[in-house]
Amino acid sequence: MKRQFLADLEPGDAVDDVFFVLEAEGPGNGRRRPVSLRLSDRSGTARAVIRRDAAGPSGDGDAAAGGAVPAAGSFIRARGRVERGRSGTVLVLTGASLVDGSALDQRLFLPGSFRDPDELSGYLEYFRTEVYDEDYACLLSAFLDDGDFMARFRMAPGELRSHHAYLGGLLEHTVSVATLCQHLLVQHPRLNGDLLLTAALLHDIGKVEEFSWQGRLEFTGEGMLWGHVLISQRMIEERVADLGGLPREKELRLLHAVISHHGEPEWGAPRRPQSAEALALHHLDNLDAKLKGYFEVIEGGRDVSWSELSNLFRRPLDEPRAADRALRR
């Protein structure tokens, strides 16, 4: 069990725990320079160096005393001490042995949703019961009753950078979009509620295969080449085939809502929305993504009244609460 987190370490602390290697630079010519690493866990990042003249442990894969240099993208058990360097604290390591990342709980190494995943899964189950069309209900069950799929769905990020870019972000975003859809159905009862809720619950399922989350969030090969919109289409079509097919009109309308939910081709939509349900899903998906993105920009801006220009919106964002906090001091 991981006990030490980078943000809590102070100069003088002994270090003996597992971290992810974000960056690694070898010793250079003559091996006179120490190996330089950038380590990370869910609390943040820290610089580390491996002393090449150390007399530390030298088991299999140990980088101390002339062993192999850990590669970026690997997990290591780091042993050493925290020291104060010229540019801040640095972990001076006497040993670093490779660890199998597949056996580690990634929630210890990556930021996650503040919301309880079990509570969010409960909302997902509730929305499933609000779909009364038997064909759409069977399709939802084909996904939501699949334990392997749900394990990935609960862990996947919603994005890599712009919004919900943390473990559990996909589940959180999906529940939020479905909630907005349910509210909209009260105001616009002419909408096909079964179609809209089913599309809301399935619109981003391709992200379980678009992204990977081993130590860092990044695209998979399929994610880079296809993107989650087309992956979602493929996944739905495969489940429909497993079920023996849906009435063609229902399948087409659902797939249209899913593949058009980004709205415009330049935003990644193969088709623009051409039905009321597709239009509703597009705008509610975009609303949740943009508002979440706004608050993430503001929360990262400290006590400033206006955010930086470089952000999801490409313009400064107002944060009136920063002025309120300043007045209370």
Image (tube, rainbow, N blue to C red):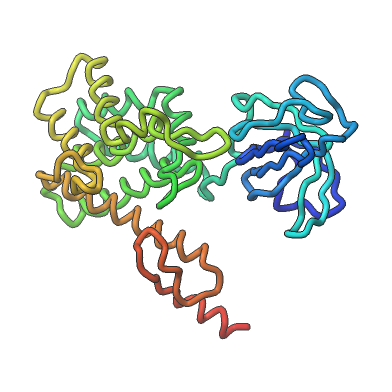
Which one is nearer the viewer's eye here, 49 or 315? 49
Tag count in the figure?
0
Q: Is residue 224 above or below residue 184?
A: above
Residue under the image location 79 percent in, 56 percent down: 85
Q: In the drawing, does residue 261 fall left or right of residue 28?
A: left
Rendering coords of residue 325 (x, y %): 56, 78
Residue 327: give x, y in percent of width and height: 56, 85
Q: Position of residue 156 (x, y in %)?
A: 45, 37
Q: Residue at x 51, y 48 (%)?
A: 115
Q: Quadrant of the C terminus?
A: bottom right
- Give the residue drawn at x 83%, y 52%: 83
> Does residue 192 appear left or right of residue 85 in this picture?
left
Judged from this view, the residue extending furthest toward the right is: 55
Quadrant of the frame with the N terminus: top right
Picture quadrant of residue 73 = top right
Left or right: residue 43 versus residue 309 is: right
Q: Residue furthest bottom?
A: 327
Q: Is residue 207 above or below residue 309?
A: above
